[in-house]
């Protein structure tokens, strides 16, 4: 019985190791690229999170839109702000592919609803890194020095860190990593 228990645990551990260790060449390349560019990705994320994103705060929403457009341009994606009287700007970007018959669209919003800062452990628009989840008594720590890796247990807290500024940064990082593939092999227009 004890031998069977050990065998089941060993098999479970082996499966878990396979689950979390990619062997697919594309996944390995993506992981390596992310590790090499991790600090730049996080720095862009922190800078975007630091801009308040309350939808009714037109001046800061404009700053968010301008920053997202700059992030797109930095990655070689022509971007423009589309405005309608009385509304917040929409950031539009496009990767044109000659001969493309289809289009892929990525959408994410960058505005948020009003909040009560008293409900936050730290100021909502001051991105704060913690050594673990806040619910598990995560302590505030500084961003690591340039070139130092990020511990996957660390958590970055700020308004919009999950909804919806993280997907914006993730999409831009993925496009930056796979830009040549998008242009050469996907044969689709890509719009943002």
Image: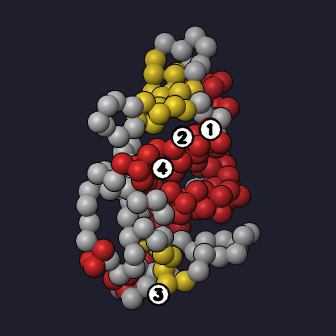
Q: Which residue is mark 2?
A: 69
Instruction: Say whether disc 4 or disc 3 marks the residue closer to the N-terminus.
Output: 4
Distance, label 2 to label 3, CA atoms, is 33 Å
Instruction: Return the mark for residue 63.
Output: 4
Distance, label 2 to label 4, CA atoms, is 10 Å
Instruction: Say whether disc 2 or disc 3 marks the residue closer to the N-terminus.
Output: 2
45 relative to 127, above or below: above
Q: 137 left or right of 188?
A: left
Q: Which residue is mark 1?
A: 73
119 relative to 191, above or below: below
Q: Which residue is mark 3?
A: 139
Say few, some or many: other residues with alpha carbon within 10 Å of mark 3 (under 14 / 14 to 19 / 20 or more): some
Report the residue at 64% width, 31% height from top. 181
Marks 1 and 2 close (CB-CB < 8 Å) = yes
Distance, label 3 to label 1, CA atoms, is 36 Å
Report the residue at 32% width, 77% height from top. 120
Say few, some or many: other residues with alpha carbon within 10 Å of mark 2 (under 14 / 14 to 19 / 20 or more): many
Q: Of discs 2 and 3, which sits in the foreground?
A: 2
Instruction: Say whether disc 2 or disc 4 marks the residue closer to the N-terminus.
Output: 4
Distance, label 1 to label 2, CA atoms, is 6 Å
Q: Quadrant of residue 113?
A: bottom left
Marks 3 and 1 close (CB-CB < 8 Å) = no
Q: Of discs 1 and 4, which sits in the foreground?
A: 4
Q: Of discs 4 and 3, which sits in the foreground?
A: 4
Position in image of residue 88 (x %, y %) = 35, 40
Position in image of residue 12 (x %, y %) = 44, 71
């Amino acid at each position: 019985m004890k031998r069977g228990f050990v065998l089941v645990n060993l098999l479970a551990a082996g499966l878990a190791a396979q689950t979390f260790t990619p062997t697919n060449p594309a996944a390995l390349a993506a992981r390596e690229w992310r590790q090499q560019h991790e600090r730049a990705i996080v720095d862009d994320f922190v800078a975007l999170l630091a801009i308040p994103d309350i939808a009714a705060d037109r001046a800061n929403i404009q700053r968010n839109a301008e920053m997202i457009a700059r992030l797109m341009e930095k990655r070689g994606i022509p971007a423009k702000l589309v405005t309608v009287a009385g509304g917040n700007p929409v950031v539009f970007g496009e990767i044109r592919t000659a001969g493309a018959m289809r289009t892929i669209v990525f959408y994410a919003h960058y505005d948020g609803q009003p909040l009560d800062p008293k409900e936050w452990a730290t100021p909502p628009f001051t991105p704060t890194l913690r050594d673990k989840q806040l619910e598990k008594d995560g302590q505030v720590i500084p961003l690591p020095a340039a070139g130092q890796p990020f511990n996957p247990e660390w958590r970055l807290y700020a308004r919009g860190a999950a909804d919806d500024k993280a997907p914006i940064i993730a999409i831009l990082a993925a496009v930056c990593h796979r830009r040549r593939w998008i242009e050469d092999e996907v044969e689709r227009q890509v719009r943002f």
